[in-house]
Structures are given as structure tokens and as C-alpha cells.
Amino acid sequence: MSKSQSQHTGGIDIDQLRVPETEVGNESLTRDEIFEMLSNRRRRFVIQYLKNKEQVGTLSDLAEQVAAWENDSSIREISSSERKTVYSSLQQFHLPKMDETGIVEFDRRAGVVELTDAAAELDIYLEVVDRYDIPWSFYYMGLSAIGAILVGLASLGVQPFVAIPPTGWTVFLIGAFGVSSLSHFLLSRGMRLESADSPAEVEDV
């Protein structure tokens, strides 16, 4: 299986995934393997759908819903060609690949797909980063740098920063980090794959 440390797909910054290693059978599913699997939007939609359907679903129903999400429409509005394209792709490539990694169990003959315990126990977060946005890691680094500069200028008596003592700047920065951390936490909870009826990347279209 190929591995990728950094991939961008459909507006999703894969570098921002925070996924722990998990056990599949007697083998460890590494972060790289999880990143590679989740780099494809259809696989993320598969996990979203199955989490909403209590871990199990049919390939036919799955293909219909994924096709609807991909085309930003309802199941009734998708065409037979759109459904067939997704169905074939899932059946021949994506589901066998996910079955191989141990994230799902795919019964090709019965047309049934089920999440494994390994997938069900994962808290999978996707940090959506728009083309005009920045990752949270860069944001925190920037906030730290600005804070260090402000405190340093106040300590050196540089106007107008000296009007607020270093302790005042420190309290301000602690508050800024607190608000940022709370916002980050709430946004991350909203990005859990199982937290909504449809994927956030579809809702944001």
C-alpha cells in the first residue's frame, strides 16, 4: 500500500487529521495508512454513511447516498449513470481497499458493508481548511509569535506598548489562547464524521 504524509483532497487538509494508531486484528493500522485511506472523498463518505446507519448498510443504498452527496443533490434527483459510476467505483476499488485495511467488512456476494470495531472506535477528525484559511497549527504559532513580540516591546519600554505592562499583555494572551482553544474544540467536535447526517464538506458547499 502506498503511503502519503501530506495530501489535499476536496478542500480537506489531510495534514490536519488527528488520528491515533489503532489495532486491526493482530496488526497495527498506522497513521499513514489511515491518511492514505481517508485522502479519498468517497471513502470518507462511506464511513460517514455507515456511522449514520449504525455501522452497516447495503452497497446499493450506499452508492445512492454517496452519489447524492457528490452531486450536491437528493437521492431522488441523481441520475442512473451517476449512481452506476459510484456503485462500480465502490464495488471494484474503494470497498475492497477499505476491507483490506480492516476498516470495513465488505461482503461482495451479499452486497453488504459493515464498519469494523476498529473504525467504530476511532474519533476521526477532519479539519477543513479553505484556500483562504490557515491550519490551526499555523494560527497558534502566529499567535505565540505576536504575543512574544508584544511582551518584549512592553518590557523594553517601547511606545505605545509600554502603556500596558507585560503582565497585562500576558493576561490578554492567555485569554486569546483560551478563546481560540475553545473555538478549536467546538469546531473539531463538529467535524466528527458521525456528528452530522451529511459530511461537513457537503454542508459547506
Image (cartoon, rainbow, N blue to C red):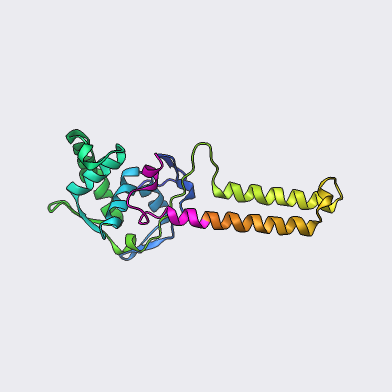
At a point 65% along the width and 47% down the height, the residue shown is 142
Residue 159 x %, y %: 85, 45
Query: Where on the picture, by quarter, is residue 23?
Result: bottom left
Q: Can residue 5 be seen in this view?
A: no
Q: Is residue 21 visible?
A: yes
At a point 46% along the width and 51% down the height, the residue shown is 17
Q: Which residue lies furthest to the right in this view?
A: 157
Pick the quarter of the image with the C terminus: top left
Q: Is residue 202 magenta?
A: yes
Relative side of 71 to 18, left or right: left
53 up-or-down from 139: above or below? below
Query: Where on the picture, by quarter, is residue 123?
Result: bottom left
Q: Which residue lies furthest to the bottom in this view?
A: 26
Residue 13 x %, y %: 46, 44
Query: Where on the picture, by quarter, is residue 54?
Result: bottom left
Residue 125 x %, y %: 43, 54
Relative side of 136 to 65, left or right: right
At a point 20% along the width and 34% down the height, the residue shown is 79
Is 98 in front, or is 78?
78
165 up-or-down from 8: above or below? below
At a point 75% along the width and 55% down the height, the residue shown is 169
Residue 116 x %, y %: 28, 61
Q: How many labels does the image show?
A: 0
Q: Give the range drawn in magenta.
A: 185-205
